[in-house]
């Protein structure tokens, strides 16, 4: 996430009067920026990753791995080191640090983005390693920094924080977590409370329980304090918010307190950024499934492998009216998704974007759409923005209400940056030499730097082949949504099939500069998009087939990347290193090249770790001791002390 503003964020009852003002000026700011930047060209395809970390306190006496709330102290040291390097011309900034939602989290980026030569890709892993070592310098004995997507025992009975706090504070009013888990910067508690207040209830997150041999059926969670009577909201659990056979969670920290791996790419032109946005969007569910790393929530094995749905629900600020549960009275729209979700509309000016591919009914603000169109924005981009702008700004700073729309984009960013979607189209920041960018946001963070580097590099190479070969991954966007659902299924990477375009090489890219008029699904009458049709341009494929190809029918993304590398000017050493990263991705996707289970996803590996632990009772419960042993093993894996044959052997560089 970006830098935090300093100021006084307004509570929801004071914010509401300004939401229209922020939206109005946000669009003015976008227009001013767009007019200045629309023709901006940059030479370099720069990119950078964001890795999110948790700091763990290992209580060896009690065999308990806990989340450390000491990260703000560690962060101050990191920020000091970063600022010193910035101000010293003899030093280079090696890594960038940002605070994150939870008080046990950190986000690290490379000091400067990576360049566009293939050899620059080989810097990613060393940059990630250096970041981890940098944090480690500031850790105390018994603390460790890990890249784990979800902390298995967040919100369990007993102690899971160091130091311990009792659950339930006025901000989140959670039955399970204390407010002390939230980063104390005013932005974060305000975001939490405003989402809850706007929604009119606590957020309700329900992930299906993994029914193991001895898990009770139905599963009614005995650890929920059903009868707590501290806040009126305490009654929500028993009044239907907590579903049977599900793991119930009631606070933003369950979602925003999980960690991910994001990659941002700068393109040469706005057109390339729009093209990349669409093409990458189709891959977000596939990469979510392949990087799946979150099989445990609140101490229980879940029947899902990914974090995405948890975060989506954890920041779902829609009112009952907006969720379609009550007739519209005070709100303007019924909205089908959380503000953290998959994208609803493609935006490229690529003529291969057929109108029928934008087949989700798009909810957008008509007056904002009109304003954008009247000011020369094309239909597709206007729809995209008018869709983002159906949301309210969630954190408004009193001091920042009035700004110069020619020079500031704060109001625009307020709404843009709280639409947490699978891909993000990022305009250049004002007064910078940064170009148009796209962020790939669906991947879960992996345990080792090697794996995180491998996935970051894979996506970076994909962007090259998308642009160089003019690849066409378009499928109807509703199918991308179906793929998001499929991605969550347990073991989806190997067991499920995903909608994918059969011929990704067809329809060569039209000559640059051709900006076609936007279309809308309602314009098509009787378009035949039936999936069963043998003529359909898409079908269901395994991830193995998508990534590795098959005999002659579908080329596969890695063979295409290798073809690209074969024809690139690249030295032997660089190629060898890149091949090792590609091997990891290839083998994660594959169920045939090695005996099944040899290279499972992180989620499968964690699940199996739990299920084969001698203390596991086959009742879905991940006890304090199992969790402790898991983190002991993770610590050893990531520092290279243990080679786990299950998924790393032979792949370490
Ligand atoms: P966010 O919008 O997620 O807060 P940031 O702006 O903090 O994103 O940066 C995300 C990533 O973008 C970082 O890895 C950073 O190195 C990278 N980045 C910064 N400048 C550029 C650029 N010009 N082109 C591509 N990536 C960049
Ligand atoms: Mg982040
Ligand atoms: Mg980001």
Image (spheres, grey):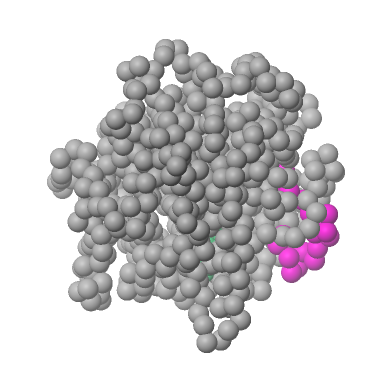
Residue farthest bottom in this picture: 90
Vertical relation: 427 (above or below) 10 = below
Residue segment shown in magenta: 389-410
Q: In which quarter of the image is the C terminus?
A: bottom left
Question: Residue at 27% across / 42% down in the picture?
Answer: 600
Magenta residues, dominant SS class: loop
Question: Residue at 47% across / 44% down in the picture?
Answer: 59
Vertical relation: 352 (above or below) 544 = below
Q: How many numbered marks appear?
A: 0
Instruction: For residue 651, say whether it is visible.
Output: yes
Magenta segment includes 406:
yes
Q: Where is residue 66 in the image (x, y as percent from the top left)?
A: 50, 43
Residue 249 in which image quadrant = top right
Q: Quadrant of the N terminus?
A: bottom right
Q: Where is residue 498 in the image (x, y as percent from the top left)?
A: 34, 37
Vertical relation: 585 (above or below) 391 = below
Question: Residue at 37% across / 51% down in the picture?
Answer: 635
Q: Where is residue 581 in the image (x, y as percent from the top left)?
A: 28, 59
Question: Residue at 37% across / 46% down in the picture?
Answer: 632
In front of the other: 614 or 251 = 614
Instruction: For residue 269, say whether it is visible.
Output: no
Residue 550 in which image quadrant = top left
Residue farthest front in this picture: 61
Q: Position of residue 557 (x, y in %)?
A: 28, 53
């Amino acid at each position: 996430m970006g830098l935090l503003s300093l100021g006084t964020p307004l509570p929801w009852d004071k914010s509401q009067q300004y939401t229209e003002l922020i939206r109005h000026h946000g669009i003015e700011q976008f227009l001013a920026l767009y007019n200045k930047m629309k023709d901006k060209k940059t030479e370099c395809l720069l990119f950078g990753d964001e890795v999110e970390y948790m700091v763990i306190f290992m209580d060896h006496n009690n065999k308990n791995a806990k989340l450390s709330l000491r990260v703000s102290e560690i962060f101050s040291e990191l920020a000091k080191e970063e600022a010193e390097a910035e101000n010293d011309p003899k030093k280079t900034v090696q890594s960038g640090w940002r605070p994150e939602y939870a008080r046990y989290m950190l986000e690290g980026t490379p000091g400067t983005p990576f360049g566009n030569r293939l050899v620059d890709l080989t810097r990613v892993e060393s940059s990630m390693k250096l970041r981890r070592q940098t944090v480690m310098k500031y850790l105390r004995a018994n603390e460790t920094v890990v890249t784990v997507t979800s902390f298995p025992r967040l919100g369990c009975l007993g102690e899971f924080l160091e130091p311990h706090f009792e659950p339930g504070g006025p901000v989140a009013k959670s039955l399970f977590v204390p407010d002390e888990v939230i980063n104390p910067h005013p932005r974060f508690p305000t975001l939490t409370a405003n989402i809850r207040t706007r929604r009119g209830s606590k957020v309700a997150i329900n992930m299906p329980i993994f029914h193991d041999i001895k898990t009770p059926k139905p599963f009614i969670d005995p650890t929920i304090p059903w009868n707590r009577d501290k806040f009126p909201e305490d009654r929500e659990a028993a009044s239907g918010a907590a579903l049977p056979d599900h793991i119930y969670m009631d606070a933003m920290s369950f979602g925003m307190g999980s960690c991910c791996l994001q990659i941002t790419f700068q393109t040469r032109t706005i057109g390339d950024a729009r093209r990349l946005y669409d093409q990458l969007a189709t891959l977000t569910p596939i990469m979510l499934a392949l990087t799946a790393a979150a099989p445990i929530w609140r101490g229980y094995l879940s029947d899902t492998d990914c974090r995405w749905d948890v975060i989506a629900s954890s920041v779902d600020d829609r009112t009952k009216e907006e969720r379609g549960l009550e007739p519209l009275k005070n709100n303007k729209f019924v909205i089908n998704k959380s503000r953290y979700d998959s994208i609803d509309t493609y935006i490229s000016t690529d003529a291969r974007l057929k109108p029928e591919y934008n087949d989700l009914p798009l909810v957008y603000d008509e007056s904002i759409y009109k304003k954008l169109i009247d000011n020369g924005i094309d239909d597709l981009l206007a729809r995209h923005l008018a869709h983002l702008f159906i949301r309210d700004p969630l954190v408004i700073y009193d001091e920042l209400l009035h700004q110069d729309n020619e020079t500031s984009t704060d109001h625009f960013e307020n709404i843009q940056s709280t639409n947490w979607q699978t891909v993000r189209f990022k305009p250049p920041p004002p007064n910078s030499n940064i170009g148009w960018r796209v962020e790939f946001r669906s991947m879960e963070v992996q345990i080792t730097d090697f794996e995180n580097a491998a996935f970051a590099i894979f996506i970076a190479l994909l962007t090259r082949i998308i642009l160089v070969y003019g690849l066409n991954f378009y499928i109807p966007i509703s199918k991308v949504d179906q793929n998001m659902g499929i991605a969550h299924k347990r073991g989806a990477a190997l067991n499920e099939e995903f909608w994918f375009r059969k011929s990704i090489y067809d329809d060569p890219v039209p000559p640059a500069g051709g900006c076609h008029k936007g279309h809308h699904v309602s314009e098509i009458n009787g378009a035949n998009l039936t999936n069963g049709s043998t003529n359909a341009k898409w079908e269901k494929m395994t991830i193995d087939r998508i990534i590795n190809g098959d005999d002659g029918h579908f080329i596969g993304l890695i063979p295409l990347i290798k073809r690209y590398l074969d024809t690139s000017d690249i030295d032997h050493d660089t190629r060898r290193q890149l091949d090792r990263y590609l091997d990891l991705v290839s083998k994660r996707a594959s169920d045939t090249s090695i005996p099944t289970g040899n290279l499972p996803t992180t989620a499968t590996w964690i699940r199996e770790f739990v299920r084969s632990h001698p203390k596991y009772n086959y009742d879905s419960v991940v006890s304090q001791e199992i969790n402790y042993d898991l983190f002991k093993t993770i610590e050893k894996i990531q520092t290279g002390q243990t080679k786990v044959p299950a998924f790393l052997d032979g792949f370490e560089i």
